[in-house]
Amino acid sequence: MANFEQLGIRPEWCEILKHQGIAVPTPVQERSIPVLLGGRDIIAEAQTGTGKTLAFLLPIIQKINVSDRSPQALIIAPTRELALQITEEAKKLTANDDKLHVLAVYGGQDVDKQLRKLQNGTQIVIGTPGRLLDHLRRGTLKLNNVKKLVLDEADQMLHMGFLDDVETILSELPHKRQTMLFSATMPKGIRHLAKTYMKDPEDVKVSSQSVIPIKQIRQQVLECTDRGKLEALRGMIDTYRPYLAIIFCRTKRRASKLNQDLREAGYASDELHGDLSQSKRENVMKAFRDAKLQVLVATDVAARGLDVEGVTHVFNYDMPHDAESYIHRIGRTGRAGGTGLAVTFATEHDRPELARIEQGIDQKLSRIQWTSEGPIASTGAARRSINSQGDDERGGRSSGTGSARRGAGRNDRRDGGRGGRGSRGGEGGRSEGGRSGGRSGGRSGEERSAGRGSARSSDSSRSAAGQGGRSSSRGASQGGRSAGRSGDERSSGWAGRSADKRTSGRSSEGSRRPESAGRGPAKGDRRDSRRGR
């Protein structure tokens, strides 16, 4: 494999890369850089996290005329976060050159500040379509000298409806220019754009054995119900203890509500979506990059193109719209050769979308369910605990460090503390090695003291204990295992829907009567209750 100098990058830039710990080019860089240095247009399609940003930044910076302060390169990105990310990379490369200037132009930032920097002159402008158009209409951004154009994450611009804005910007550029189009996928709309505005582009497609880097990202589908989804998510975070995790939601309101629930439960989390001010978004991202947050709850648009070192887990709390969205979501982990875990939560009504995603990525994803003992495989006879694999998926923080360790306390509470709660008697019994009879019996005693009187017959007590506070259709001979399984299904797989309906009206604190008494106490119970009073 060639090094950067052999690809045509000048020694001074290679030295800067070495100081950043970058010595060997990635496949997309190896194939793109010589083409771009030769002045040709390019359409580069590569998996997310493969180093596309450096693939276009290095040739651009090397070709900039530092004696000319007018904009010579324009890089268009779909989101503010991605624009800032590209700007940071460019500033790292140009930190030692005070004649080369880079400016980020995006919404939510002080317009006057941007105007002053544009007036002072900047050779590389990186921005979002909306704010670039704003400056063009104001007459504060002149593009007549631009020689290099980059459309980064072009497919996302199409999905977000920016295509008309992008075409308006392209109409303001000189006809004689070099155009670079980089993206993870290439839908028909982007191909049409390329055909219209590019001149004999070189096609560069870097692919592995599949669309997704399977060797770097382990992918699972967690079957659950809508009601059990939050509990399953908390359980997965507690089990795998990610160093950094991104949780994807479909809407801003959904992301905000989930973040609130996680924070109230004690997790170090925050949210990222379009309703936040730019300063708030920047503060959230800085805290996440600095690992002051363990969990980032985000929408697709806000997290598009984010490249954060150390993201070990991605949770698709809401099903992605399509295969392309799925690829971009899970690509936040396993970046640049790292490893990661991607878990997609699927309810029964998500089945059609899940089938389309699997068809789009040409891969059948493994299924799991959440139980009180942790995640288990959910395919036929292969139902087994996969907790033993947790060490491979965990973020790697030591047991006494940082917010990620909060999950350890929750695990202890889950294993030992839930047995005493009315809605978790079965789980408590199961986690104690099948001793749910004792747990349930103890709870029926609590129920007697709460409202049934102390003179309840021993037959009634034994019946409550045999049920394990869960399923009235199972006898005492089945013990806590049956009760525990019924409780697990309630909070996880599609099989738990009937259990959800049975338990939906029950108190979680064990102060109500067991399910067998749902139609009111028997006559003998009423007599016992009166005696108790």
Image (cartoon, grey):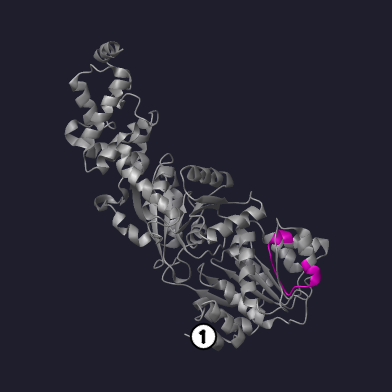
Q: Residue at x 29, y 39 (%)?
A: 428
Count the marks: 1
Range shown magenta: 117-131
Q: Is residue 67 left or right of residue 451?
A: right
Image point (33%, 38%), residue name: 418
Which one is nearer the viewer's eye here, 494 or 105?
105
Identified by mark 1, the residue type is Asn
Q: Which residue is mark 1?
A: 3
Q: Is residue 129 magenta?
A: yes
The residue lying toward the viewer, choosing from 355 and 166, is 166
Occupied quadrant, residue 398: bottom left
Question: Is 466 in the magenta?
Answer: no
- Which image quarter is the C terminus in? top left
Residue 472 shows in this picture = no
Q: Quarter-wise, where is residue 472 in the image?
A: top left
Report the residue at 67% width, 59% height from top.
Answer: 162
Please identify the residue farthest to the right as the structure is shown: 139
42 in relation to 226, above or below? below
- List x then y, in percent, for residue 275: 64, 48
Query: Is 207 positioned to the left or the right of 432 in the image?
Result: right
